[in-house]
Image (spheres, coloured by chain):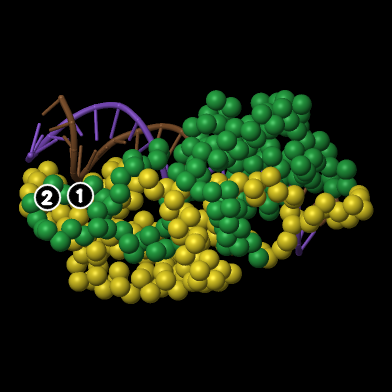
Chain colours: A yellow, B green, C brown, D purple
Amino acid sequence: MPAAPRKKTAATPSAAAPAPAPERLEAGTLEALIGYNTRRAYSVISALFFERMAPYGLKQVEYSVLALLAHNPGATSRQLCATLDILPPNLVSLISALDRRGLIERRPHPRDGRAIGLHLTAAGLALAQETEQVVIELESDAADALTARERETLRNLLQKLYKA
Amino acid sequence: MPAAPRKKTAATPSAAAPAPAPERLEAGTLEALIGYNTRRAYSVISALFFERMAPYGLKQVEYSVLALLAHNPGATSRQLCATLDILPPNLVSLISALDRRGLIERRPHPRDGRAIGLHLTAAGLALAQETEQVVIELESDAADALTARERETLRNLLQKLYKA
DNA sequence: TATTGTTATACTCTATAACTATA
DNA sequence: TATAGTTATAGAGTATAACAATA
């Protein structure tokens, strides 16, 4: 789903019929919606993430898990689910895959026999560090129409939508 | 996927071990990313949209199509796809469903025998108008932590990410 | 009785290839 | 030959129910 071509929407031409039907439609009502704009923006960043991270074989959620484990060694699946707002059954195969690739290790949890502590391996830590730079650059490219201040404002406003 | 409970993330407690394992993990690195915040925000608004619009049987993309046809009568599938950034095969069943529900009509295109002009029926227009108010209210509720100015800023910054 | 991790499963979303009819 | 609409299909993503082991 690569980013759409750079073309502006036509603004209700007053001269009428015989023109060759504009590519884009008048979408003012939709563009007044935060939900619509959020979906479109997410779609663009998402596609760029997929493209740049393909060489490392990491999808967004997989990268998120590695990044969380780098700062929270021994975290459990349950904690990852709560933090990332994903459902436990959907994390199982993801964790298994990262384990099979030798990026994480499952160790018995020190204080809860039901739980499993997740830890990055050396390879996992290396990949997390290497890809962090790629993600930072990718984000910077995706937001190159925004100033540093605007990027910070955007992050803050988005967080207000999903936090507390 | 209902919005997560209102609970703040713990900020690296200096007193260590015997506490009962925090719900959420330290996610500072992820929260510095526009992509991550956009995904989380979209997920929340999306869930609220689904909940409030369920009585009308409209998903987000379906609402978008009705809204576009209200302002662009006779638009083609191709134009809808270009405007909404979705792929033609994925629009087919959606259009069929709206047609079967009597919300839209397909008429032969006046200047292109391959194309089909899409129009709202009276029922479709009524539903579009009725649900527009629901969407506006839902958006207002989703963004109730933001001032009017902040909402406008957010929309503008998001549009800069996916336009031109 | 409640929770962690898991299996199985189903439904939606998104993507590609290939066909048809018109241009 | 290129484009509009379509079919079929495959792969992600996301959701629920139910179970075993442990608390």
Q: Residue A151: in sight, yes or no?
A: yes
Are callouts 1 and 2 both on one chain?
A: yes
Give the answer, above or below, for where D14 lies relative to A67. above
Please state, as top left, top right, bottom left or bottom right, where the N terminus of chain A lies in the image. Answer: bottom right
Q: Residue at x 66, y 29 (%)?
A: B130
The image position of residue A142, as x and y in percent, is 53, 67
Residue on which disc 2 sits = B19
Please state, as top left, top right, bottom left or bottom right, where the C terminus of chain A lies in the image. Answer: top left
Q: Quadrant of residue A96?
A: bottom left
- Number of disc labels: 2
Q: Quadrant of residue B162?
A: bottom right
Q: Residue at x 55, y 40 (%)?
A: B140
The foreground one among B108 and B76 is B76
CB atoms at circles 1 and 2 under 8 Å apart?
yes
Q: Could you tell whether B45 is left or right of D15 in the image?
A: right
Q: Which secondary structure, mark 2?
A: loop
